[in-house]
Image: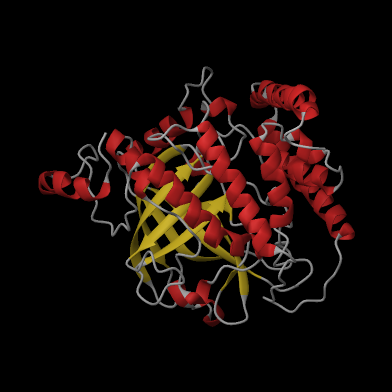
Amino acid sequence: MNPGGPFTYFVLRPLSDLFLWAWRLERRLEFLYRAHFDRWLRPPLFALLQALQNRLREDEHLALAQEKQLPDEERYTQEIIDEISAFTRENWLPGAAQRFGNTKTFGVLRGEFTVLPDLPEHLREGLFAAPREYPAWVRFSGPGPFAPPDLEDLGQCSVAIKVMGVDGPKLMPDEERTQDLILVSPASFVTPDIRENSRMQKWVRAKAPLGYLLDPPGRHLLHLAMQLLYSPMHANPLEVQYYSNVPFLLGEGRAVEYSLRPKRRGRTRIPAHPTENYLREAMVRTLARGDWEMDFMVQVQTDPHRMPIEDATVKWPERLSPYVPVARLRLPAQRFYSDAQLAFADVLRYNPWHSLPEHRPLGNSNRARRRMYAELAQLRQSMNAVPHVEPDGSEVFPDDARGPEQQRRATVVGRRAVPEG
């Protein structure tokens, strides 16, 4: 099937729209059952789908933390960049271009990332080598590739943590003192590798994502089912557990995946009549009441087949290796919803390769992200005529409820950190 052909335009595109319409209709009924479904049925259903997927996967007999290049990996990376670049130019006007993934900004929040004391010796590497508190800018966002009203999104959230003041050499030269940590709410990724991701982007650009599932049918349906299990109608992005989906080094020869989990159970209710930005409004109410804390955790790879490096659709089993808290993310009570602070998201670039060598990203999806994220961020910022800024935590915004002296500094710092308009 051809994503640009008449069959796609006249058949697959309307069918994709119908599927999304039915999904959004179902989400309006989720308040009746979803909490009980997620508690009792989601874990066994997800485990069953993962077991079926593992039966279909070939054991490549790799070592722990060992990578394996895909054939034509650079070609697939370039195809993804080309498709997303074309999508961005076709769907966003200059001055208003958004990220292709993690598109809608719910908020860029001031945070404190504190490495915990008394960690096990094998976890004391890089950023986690010693107890210390770092400033952070934390961006919560929706899935993309568009930025619809929250009720019409795809039921997924993401969080990007830019830890600042991190000394040491970095894997990318465009930022000198940052460590970026990027996580999403689904427990597994939608495509296993960049070869499949390249094919999917062609269908997304054609606005017929259903075509990807049928071209040809197979494990794509498994991956979709796993995504749907982790795509509910969310009530509050602060109350969601997030996963990296892809692995990273933790020192030499040791691979880990990340997760971010709230320390308190969520209590936010979905409004009876949700507004266009009800998720941001829920975050605003939470942080108006007080601080919010989350555990940043690592999961160490112990089985190279059951916990693969190169397949992002496989969730590493927690019974083989449980998550271990290594740091705490504290979001102090704050106001973060001014136009200036929301605009601040546009000058930021989040890239997992803004990293110490001890946390080098692993796997083909991560290898592609180095070029992909950098080039797409450059395209977005050039379309919007805004600079790339490496923040240091001193940024102040006129409406962020800080003291008089910091308010006085807002104009000076704002010129450096926030685009006009």
Q: Quadrant of residue 281?
A: top left
In the image, 325 versus 203, the foreground residue is: 203
Q: Quadrant of residue 27?
A: top right
Residue at horizontal 49 percent and vertical 43 percent from the top: 99
Q: Is 60 left, or right, of 398 in this rendering?
A: right
Q: How is the image coloured?
A: secondary structure
Q: Position of residue 356 (x, y in %)?
A: 45, 73
Residue found farthest to the front:
5
Image point (39%, 46%), residue name = 381
| Place of residue 162 in the rendered image (x, y in percent of width and height, measured from the top left) | 40, 57
Give residue 167's position: percent from left, percent from top. Answer: 35, 74
Q: Is residue 144 visible?
A: no
Residue 57 appears left or right of 300: right
Please determine whether, in this image, residue 192 is positioned above or below residue 415: below
Q: Residue 72: tell me if it is visible.
A: yes
- x and y, in percent, of residue 40 in the image: 75, 41
Residue located farthest toward the top when viewing the structure as drawn: 273
Residue located farthest toward the right when viewing the structure as drawn = 55
Relative to 394, say whether 222 is above or below: above
Say which quadrant the C terminus sits in.
top left
The quarter of the image holding the N terminus is: top right
* Residue closer to the observer: 332 or 196: 196
Indicate left or right for 416 with 143 as reference: left
